[in-house]
Image (cartoon, helix red, strand yellow):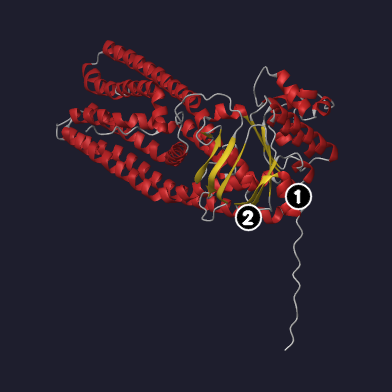
Amino acid sequence: MSTPFKRPDELRRLLQSCRGYFVTAAIFSLAINLLYLAGPLYMLQVYDRVIASASEITLLMLTIALLMALLALAGLDAVRARVLTRASIRLDQTIAARVMTAIIHRSAGAGGARSQLLRDFDTFRQFVTGMGIHAIFDLPWAPIYIAVIFVLHPFLGAFALGCSILLILMALFNEWRVKLPLTEAGEAASRSYSFTEMSLRNTEVVRAMGMTEGLLRRWARDRTRMLERQVSASDRAATMQSMIRFLRLAMQSMILGLGAYLVIERLATVGAMFAASILLGRALQPVEQIVGSWRNLVSARGAFLRIRELLKADPQREVGLTLPRPQGRLSVEGLSYVPPFGSKPILRGVSFAIEPGEVLGIIGPSGAGKSTLSRHLVGVLAPSAGAVRLDGADVSSWIKTSLGQHIGYLPQDIELFADTVAVNISRFQEGEDREVILAARMADVHEMILRLPDGYDTQVGEGGAILSGGYRQRIGLARAIFANPSLLVLDEPSSNLDAEGDAALADCILQLKKRGTTVVIISHRPATIGVADKILVLREGVVEMFGPRAEILARLTRPVPIHTVRETTG
């Protein structure tokens, strides 16, 4: 039996596309570190040969060779930096869109913004172009310098090897000391940024009800924790960095002393003494640089791990067979849903079915799970049990880019994008002007759009800030019915509409019904539900009633019998 092959995680697989850049940078690092030997070798030759022979021609040639080596070193160092910058760009081109897709899917399922995850990706990407990555590339070549020191004299080489091991142990000790406070600081920063984003989305409420002072106290809680742990980590890292710098400088001086002793004993030359000091400093320099940029290194590592977990939580699906346009037959089979980190189900065993072209009205008290059900119908949420099927296919496993072309969705909280009216209606599709105008006319918002300053090219601002609630709702409706979807789900579509808007909405639904579009409406307004063929009553996540509209409304309006209580006398 063959052993199953374990596939690498997706982030590492995506990073393979940049392997060529990193291999090239490693090769340049080898050449750079070999060229760094030019200085010590120049000193060795000057002290041991030029001064002894008093040859000016030899000194001139050695000097020219040194300058050529240093010029090549500077050129290779600049090229390596450019290669790593191109690697950062390639990372963004290869991974950023995938990360953004995973963030969108995770935000839809968990609710709330996740822009911190995109900042994590930028933190990791920018580390690739920072100074810390250069020290990491130089560190593996430090044994070259130690080997050359061994050639100069075994005692000097053994001393250099011991110094290198001691500094590496100090760097590992520094990692142990700063890891916990840096991790806690990162967690507090993530909570602080998330709370800040939420606060900025609700500035009108904050200002109107005088919540600024209290909000700042709550905002400062995580931020203060973040600063405290950052200070603790920085203090520990600064102390360790100072100790490592002291040890490196002391070691460079001590190897000079050891070299002087060997010169006195006629076991080494003066040139070897000075060359060994320079070589040891170069061998230990990457360790000091890594410790100096340890905070950035830890942040990049933490960002890498969070991005990897994000991609694992939202695995990329293989492109499968593209299903044909659905007719709109919708069936819900034993749907149950328990939110992440929750224990109480919001939906329990919900089952119903409607045919293409039918209009279903969903009613029920607040907290009954109506909006959660609507998100399941369009495939935004994956059920804990059961399935939602469109023409027999499970919508949660349907390829989203394909399914989305056949679904219209108007959520309860309408968000427009900071772009033009036309772009919002067209769902970012280009060259669909005719479909945009057709959708606007069906939503009865075409004339209203034409009265805007730039018509369909009017910038709506962030979230549609320049538009009224009614305008946003009608434009959201036009976006939902764009390109004639097979299934349309409307969650409280008339909450911001007046009587005229209600009439326009009812007329739009009737037009869609004639086209064969299946429509699901969640509403508390009788005028909106009045166009429904069937009604589903949802209470505490359970289907209480389902059937034709007239039958369900009759049962809901049936008078409650009054029982006469007869008094008995004893």
- Helix, strand or loop at mark 2: helix
Q: From the top left corner, tell me how far across and down residue 453 is, in percent.
A: 83, 26
Residue 48, percent from left and from top:
22, 22
Quarter in which the C terminus is drawn: bottom right
Residue type, mark 2 in image: Arg
> Toward the viewer: 16 or 372?
372
**In the displayed structure, does residue 252 sit left or right of residue 387?**
left
> Image point 75% across, 62% down: which residue?
560
From the top left corner, tell me how far across and down residue 421 is, in percent: 74, 27
Sequence order check: which comes first, mark 2 or mark 1? 1
Vertical order, 406 against 495 (above or below): above
The reply to whether residue 469 is visible in this rendering is yes
Is disc 2 surrounded by few (<14), some (14 to 19) or many (20+) residues within 10 Å?
Answer: few
Name the residue: 42% across, 51% down: 180
Tell me residue 143's x, y (percent). Answer: 25, 31
Q: Specify whether 193 is left or right of 320.
A: right
Distance from disc 2 to disc 1, alpha carbons, whole Å, reads 16 Å
Disc 1: which residue: 207
Residue ID for mark 2:
218
